[in-house]
Amino acid sequence: MFAGTLVGTKLDWFSSLPEKSITLFEVFLRSFISHFSTNKAKPLEVVDLIEVKQAKKEFIKQFLCRFREVMVQIPQPNK
């Protein structure tokens, strides 16, 4: 029944597993997380603020709003 809940790349991955290669749910869980954890977004760091640039014809107020939006996503911006 579980396979019926999967779609897309997750179903493709599950279908490609060798038959009887998963004997415990814990083994499946580790394999699943290991395979799909690369899709997680990298946490932002202070150095990422360098990439936030003011666009042409963008008002300074708009730019500062975007800059602040990025800054609040950084765990320790005072580094």
Image (cartoon, rainbow, N blue to C red):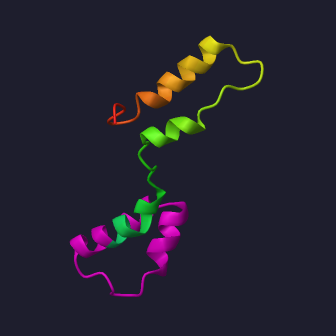
* Tally of numbered discs: 0
Q: State yes or no: residue 15 in magenta.
A: yes
Residue at the outermost right position: 57
Residue at the outermost front position: 79
Question: Dividing the image into 4 quarters, which one contains the N terminus?
Answer: bottom left
Residue visible at 22% across and 71% down in the picture: 26
Q: Is residue 61 above or below residue 25?
A: above
Residue 42: x and y in percent read: 44, 50
Position of residue 31 in the picture relative to residue 55 (left or right): left
Residue 18: x and y in percent read: 42, 87
Q: Nearer the viewer, residue 37 or 73?
A: 73
Q: Which residues are magenta?
A: 1-30
Residue visible at 42% across and 69% down in the picture: 35
Q: Is residue 48 above or below residue 31?
A: above
Question: Dividing the image into 4 quarters, which one contains the C terminus?
Answer: top left
Residue visible at 44% across and 53% down in the picture: 40
Q: Is residue 47 visible?
A: yes
Q: Is residue 1 visible?
A: no
Which SS does the magenta portion mostly show? helix
Q: Is residue 73 above or below residue 22?
A: above
Give residue 77's quadrant in the image: top left
Residue 72: x and y in percent read: 40, 27
Q: State yes or no: residue 46 in magenta.
A: no
Q: Nearer the viewer, residue 14 or 49?
A: 49
Residue 9: x and y in percent read: 53, 65
